[in-house]
Amino acid sequence: MTLTQLEYILAVADTGSFSHAARQCHVTQPTLSMQIQKLEEELGVILFDRTKQPIRATSVGEEVLQQARLVVKGSQHLKEIVDDAKGSLRGELRIGIIPTLAPYLLPLFLKKIKDAHSSLHLTFEELQTEVMIEKIRNHSLDLGIIVTPIDDLNIANHVLFYEPFNVYLSKGHPLLSQKSLDEKDLSSEDVLLLNEGHCFREQSLSLCRNKKSPAVMDRSFTFESGSLETLKKLVDQGESFTLLPYLAALDVQDKKRLRPFSDPVPTREVSLVHGPHFQRKALLKALIETIKKNLPEGLSATKGKNQLKIDNPLGYLK
């Protein structure tokens, strides 16, 4: 049994195809198939059901794959520990980030971290919180940038910043007459929301508690989006209002239609998280420092006295 064979079966499991796995591993398909067959013969089991497309692992294959990920990841950790001790930030780092942060946070620090550490290859994946945490648990991701807390003792988190919420109103909306808004001003019948699975949706609903607000506008349709940018454009077309995190509100063209919350300001805690096997301390420190140094004014690494932290309703994952 070799590490190469384990890497091959993981590639097949991830791609669902022997041909795609071979390309990913930079070998010919016959070479990859022969090595996997040798491993199956040594173990005395069939790891993949080759009659299905995409190819699926057998029940015993799933167990072997789970352990193979630990072994391959462990071998990578050996190199990473040495590189970390030398202060050499190189290799590959796989990072997940939630959709309500990705388009606004990544441009702030990505070029800086790439320029400072050219030997480091970063792979970012935009994912919802639940999927991302599962990928961290099964070692498919190294790190995640999410809204915390996460109720999992095996997930460590490092707070990056606290991000206040804003209300973005359509032209002519009755609430534009107010300089700041309160929870009692916002109706769940009037707000445009992200679709289910986004923690920001649940946080928005927790703030829009007024079912009978006099400021509710007539709306002839219901729409839920996976993108804050879509919600902003609908508001621009005259549709009610939506809630925006601070970073997503920075590029709003008509700032006169943004309203802050009155104290205490609803705020979400954004953190970098990882599993118990992540050992690259120097890299973790460099990434955290780079993100914090490139945050705009209005974001702080500590919660202000006038801020009310809104917990992640989807963060309590089993």
Image: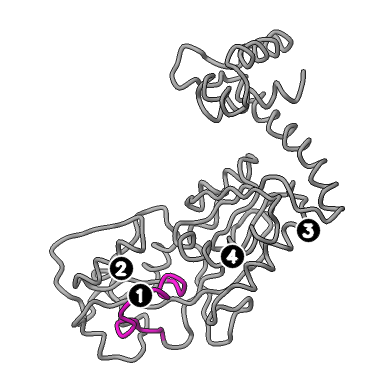
Q: Which residues are magenta?
A: 245-261
Task: Check if mark 3's residue and mark 4's residue have beta carbons within 8 Å.
Answer: no
Disc 1 or 4, which lies upstream in sequence? 4
Disc 2 or 1, which lies upstream in sequence? 2
The residue singled out by tag 1 in the image is 252
Whole-number angstrom distance, CA of label 1 to CA of label 4: 20 Å
Task: Check if mark 2's residue and mark 1's residue have beta carbons within 8 Å.
Answer: yes
Provide the secondary structure element on which disc 2 rests.
helix
Q: Position of residue 226 (x, y in %)?
A: 35, 55
The residue singled out by tag 2 in the image is 232
Residue under the image location 63 percent in, 44 percent down: 137
Task: Check if mark 1's residue and mark 4's residue have beta carbons within 8 Å.
Answer: no
Q: Nearer the viewer, residue 301 or 151?
A: 301
Query: In the drawing, does residue 213 fall left or right of residue 136?
Result: left
Residue under the image location 63 percent in, 78 percent down: 302
Q: Nearer the viewer, residue 198 or 90?
A: 90
Mark 4: amino acid: Phe
Query: In the drawing, does residue 38 fall left or right of residue 129?
Result: right
Would you call the spot at circle 2 few (<14 residues within 10 Å), some (14-19), or many (20 or more)? many
The residue singled out by tag 3 in the image is 282
Quadrant where the N terminus sits is top right
Residue 272's label in the rendered image is: none
Whole-number angstrom distance, CA of label 2 to CA of label 1: 8 Å
Mark 2: amino acid: Lys
Residue under the image location 60 percent in, 72 percent down: 294
Task: Check if mark 2's residue and mark 4's residue have beta carbons within 8 Å.
Answer: no
